[in-house]
Image: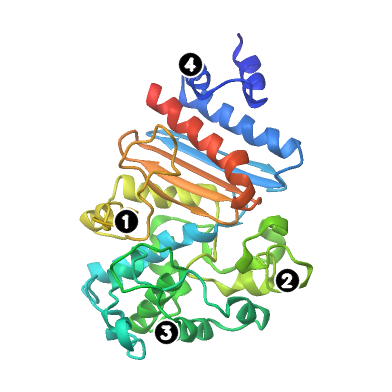
Amino acid sequence: MKRRQFISTATAGVFTGVHFAAAASSMKDTFDIAAGLIQTQVDAGKVESAAIDIRRGSFTETRAFGKAASPEAPFLIASITKTMTAAGIMILVDRGELKLSDPVSKYIPEFSKGDRKDITIKQVLTHTSGLPDQLQENNDLRKAHAPMKEFVQGAVRTPLLFKPGTKYSYQSMGILLASEVARRITKMQFRDFLKQEVFVPLGMKHSALGMGDYEMSEVVRGQIENAAPESGAGAAGSSDWDWNSAYWREFGAPWGGAHSTAGDVAIFLRSFLKPDGKILKPETARAMIQNHNQGLDRPRGLGFDVSTKYFGKSSSEKTFGHRGSTGTIAWADPETDVSCVILTSLPLSVSWELLLKPVTDLVSGIVADQ
């Protein structure tokens, strides 16, 4: 079977991952098949915009699809932002300006009632703080176009779900408080700190927390019909505070409000595959992608997911990364030197089974067989 014929048949969903692996004799084949899977969903009208970046060693391929004007089109990457926020915090650890064992209350004194006083920087980075993912008043705050300080105030007083350190529970509000600690230490807006200390040193020219220098017409719009509940879930009355609103795009949530490109996210990931000291000490970068939740039911790195549950059926146990509710995934495998970034406009609740998981399984499976 000719290569072009195989790709056409594979994208129609006829072949299994084993057949994909057998036909892909190179990383270029891998990329072309993955791109074909994405193009199929774009042509079917299910995905409006997408971008993919796959790298291994000297191999780099990036491509945009649909309404994404080019590979440099910025997407709202949602919770992949958390990994970048965590990197900012660890820069301060490297500088000796805080410790992972420090209580958050050392820097946010008002966060000290009851068990709050025992929550550490490490716990807010590993989702073991007991804080909730979103505030009970989240939607009301967004509807009111509340500033960041009101979300911080809400996170300071919100009830804890359990005693800190005893369980894992995904918590965007812990990441928010980590960024507030950095803001108070540096006396800088956190978006400016990330730009200065992470994006610029790594050459991430198309990334910003919030809108940066982008205009609304330049950023990729999301398909909000299946948006997450905290983003309006596509309801007609949420259009001035949902993912596509000027308010939310500019807000710059440190837990999910960064704009970036597939290529820039790949640059960030690969700074942990082969740490060179540009933003973090090599030993710090390595520590961020190791499990810090020993004894609990969900492994987590510092800001990164290291469970490998979502990073390809054939990925190694060392694989790290993150997904985003706007329809994004980014992962890298130190054993194979592969990084894979897929950004889409279709919310994760739909795009995961439709596209992100199949492509991720494809890439990890082919690499494992090469």
- Locate residue 108: give its quadrant: bottom left
**Furthest residue in direction right, as rendered:** 236
- Locate residue 114: give its quadrant: bottom left
Q: Which mark is residue 22?
A: 4
Give SS at disc 3.
helix
Residue labelled with disc 1: 301
Residue labelled with disc 3: 156
In terms of sequence position, does the residue under pointer 3 or pointer 1 come before the other?
A: 3
> Residue 43's x, y, as percent?
75, 36
In terms of sequence position, does the residue under pointer 3 or pointer 4 come before the other?
A: 4
| Spatial separation of the CA atoms under disc 3 and disc 4 | 54 Å
In terms of sequence position, does the residue under pointer 3 or pointer 2 come before the other?
A: 3
What type is the residue that disc 1 sits on?
A: Gly
Residue labelled with disc 2: 238
| Spatial separation of the CA atoms under disc 2 and disc 4 | 47 Å
In terms of sequence position, does the residue under pointer 2 or pointer 1 come before the other?
A: 2
Instruction: Check if mark 3's residue and mark 2's residue have beta carbons within 8 Å.
Output: no
Foreground tag (3 vs 4): 3
Can residue 99 be seen in this snapshot?
yes
Numbered label tally: 4
In terms of sequence position, does the residue under pointer 2 or pointer 4 come before the other?
A: 4
Foreground tag (2 vs 4): 2
> Residue 100's x, y, as percent?
24, 70
In the image, what residue occupies the spot 41% across and 81% down?
Answer: 188
What type is the residue that disc 3 sits on?
A: Val
Is 317 or 211 nearer to us in this picture? 317
In terms of sequence position, does the residue under pointer 1 or pointer 4 come before the other?
A: 4
Please tell me how crowded label 2 is: few (under 14), some (14-19), or many (20+) other residues with Cα within 10 Å. some
What type is the residue that disc 2 sits on?
A: Ser
